[in-house]
Amino acid sequence: MPVKQLHTRKEFIRTSTILVAGALALPGMAMGRKQPRLAFSTLGCPDWDFNRITEFAEQHGYTGIEVRGIQREMDLVKSSIFSSAEARKATMRRMKEKGLQFVGLGSSSTLHFSEAAQRTKQLDEGRRFIDLAAQINCPYVRVFPNNFPKNQEKQATMDLITRGLQELGNHAKGSGVTVLMETHGDMVWTADILQIMEAANHPQVALVWDVTNMWTITGEDPVEMYGKLKPYIRHVHVKDATKAGGKLNYTFLGKGEVPIMKAIAALRDDRYKGFYSFEWEKLWHPEIAEPDIALADYPAAIKQQFQ
């Protein structure tokens, strides 16, 4: 073999070895895994202003923000960052500068009510949030199912929730927004959720999958949940907790009793493309850890599942 060819072959082998070793050194690359798309809900930082929220998100590797109140203003249409066309433009400029996107707006719209005035109020909130989401290029608006009132037949409540989702879905047509029912309240059994989704049967209606809301009540296996619900799942809430005396105590990811890592593995292995949104319920539970600690812990904890 000529000397020049031998030299070239050696160079090729050495270069290939370096490239392979480098690829293996990168987290997740050996298994062809992409890193998760991370977001957090502003429920976890109820007193932060928008600049602090976006600065923190950029610094800690988040690319999405789920908005559930800004400085304790839960009616987002009234929030100073969204309340006028000028404010919305400034907000979108800030998001672009920080490499962020809005991944969901958390409304309080609740669909189980039968009383006419209350029902109208709840649906009107959903519509206002859908309109806002369309104005800020946000793909999802979360709504609640939510309870099975004792003075109302269960099927009647299921029908009310279904019709509410259809009405909001119709309002969202052509907007680029999808209405997501969260697995929440009494609507946490897989069979009930499936019945609602199948009955709604609307292209603008899907699910926020909150594993913890479901498992802590039903004890259903997350892999089985996912296998049945995955056609409808567009967004995922991630949180962990322990149970003591019937009460939930929220913990950092991986430190509780919820089989949340099992759920994340199912999503990961099925190449789920949406966001894993950390829902640290600081607004409702002021005793839990401060947001600068909890929201910083989450990216490192979840990325371990993608190595």
Image: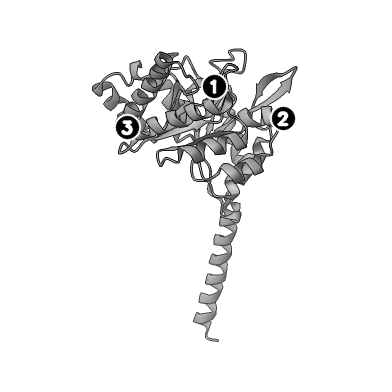
Residue 236 x/y as whole percent: 53, 35
25 versus 254 height, above or below: below
Of marks 2 and 1, which one's residue comes earlier in the chain? Answer: 2
Side of 185 where 217 appears, left or right = right
Q: Nearer the viewer, residue 154 or 222?
A: 154
Give, as a three-letter code, the residue at label 1. Answer: Asp
Side of 18 where 139 appears, left or right = left
Residue 189 x/y as whole percent: 62, 33
SS class of the residue under badge 1?
helix
Q: Nearer the viewer, residue 78 or 286?
A: 78
Q: Is residue 160 visible?
A: yes
- Foreground disc of the pair 1, 3: 3
Of marks 2 and 3, which one's residue comes earlier in the chain? Answer: 3
Of marks 1 and 3, which one's residue comes earlier in the chain? Answer: 3
Are the residues at dot 2 and dot 1 in contact (C-beta closer than 8 Å)? no
SS class of the residue under badge 2?
loop
Q: Nearer the viewer, residue 222 or 158?
A: 158
Residue 51 x/y as whole percent: 39, 22
Give neighbour class at mark 3: few <14, some 14-19, many 20+ (Cα, 10 Å).
some
Identify the image quadrant of residue 230: top right
Q: Which residue is mark 1?
A: 292
Give neighbour class at mark 1: few <14, some 14-19, many 20+ (Cα, 10 Å).
few
Give, as a three-letter code, the residue at label 3. Answer: Ala
Point 58% across, 64% down: residue: 17
Name the mark on residue 257: 2
Give, as a three-letter code, the residue at label 2. Answer: Glu
SS class of the residue under badge 3?
helix
